[in-house]
Image: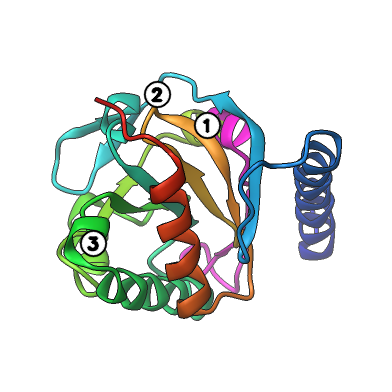
Amino acid sequence: MSNASLRWGFLAAFAALIGIVAGTALLKPATVEIRSGTVLRTPRPVIDFVMNNADGKPFTKADLAGHWTVIFPGFTFCPDVCPTTLATLKAVREKLDAADAAKVHVVMLSVDPERDTPEKLLAYVHAFSKDFVGITGSTETLDRLGENIGYVYTKVPGATAETYTIDHSAAMILIGPDATLRGYFTPPYTVDALVADLRTLIATTPQAS
């Protein structure tokens, strides 16, 4: 398949994803409004899954409970979007007070398990913050979770087998403290808007016990 065909397929899948999100927002307006994206009127269940944490331990749905989680799909070889987004999230957490920052976990979900070993992923996320978590999994697991919580990605061949890249959706996924899908942050991102939105979400959503 040509690079152009891969990219068109990726764009079509991403367009379908955005359509689903927009349709949900229109049919059932969110009771909480945020500046940086969309909050779903009705939270969606997250499927059970097992990913590989960059620290060598399994990462499962249970690790999403008890706090807000911002999941960003990406990969360590990403030249621009991924490092820029993680730097933004670092700045966001630094602007939150300590109590609110503790209620927001940042997870980078690598969609490049072929190259992103646990060691590489750990070093990458910790270059931005020691509090950030890096996870990845098999292609099958990534695809199943992507269909469930709303991210898409596709491998784009490069000049050699080792120089491929990954096209992926840039939206950040919001998981609530009850481990359900709550909404999305969508680019362009600004630190102040994200900080305000996270404060709103924390203040209006009871934390899981």
Q: Secondary structure at mark 1?
A: helix
Which quadrant would residue 147 be assigned to in this image?
Answer: top right
How far is disc 2 from disc 3 in space, using C-alphas? 22 Å
Residue nearest the viewer, comparing 117 with 43: 43
- Residue 72, given in percent of the width and then of the height, sits at 46, 56
* Vertical position of residue 149 compared to residue 121: above or below: above
Which quadrant would residue 129 be assigned to in this image?
Answer: bottom left
How far is disc 2 from disc 1 in space, using C-alphas? 7 Å
Residue nearest the viewer, comparing 40 with 137: 40
Q: Secondary structure at mark 2?
A: loop
How far is disc 1 from disc 3 in space, using C-alphas? 22 Å
* Vertical position of residue 146 compared to residue 5: above or below: above
Please indicate, yes or no, whether residue 137 appears anywhere in the rendered image. Answer: yes
- Point 37% across, 78% down: residue: 87
Give yes or no for contact between labels 1 and 3 (Cβ–Cβ under 8 Å). Answer: no
Q: In this image, 108 relative to 164: left or right?
A: left
Q: What type is the residue that disc 2 sits on?
A: Phe
**Tag of residue 120:** 3
Q: What type is the residue that disc 1 sits on?
A: Leu
Q: Residues within 10 Å of mark 2 (few under 14, many from 20)?
A: some
Residue interval drawn in magenta:
144-168
Residue nearest the viewer, comparing 164 with 88: 88
Quarter of the image for the C terminus: give it. top left
Give yes or no for contact between labels 2 and 1 (Cβ–Cβ under 8 Å). Answer: yes
Give yes or no for contact between labels 2 and 3 (Cβ–Cβ under 8 Å). Answer: no
Is residue 165 on the magenta stretch? yes
Write down the residue under mark 1.
Answer: 145
Write down the residue under mark 2.
Answer: 49
* Vertical position of residue 88 compared to residue 167: above or below: below
Which sits earlier in the primary sequence, circle 2 or circle 3? 2
Q: In this image, 189 relative to 59: left or right?
A: right
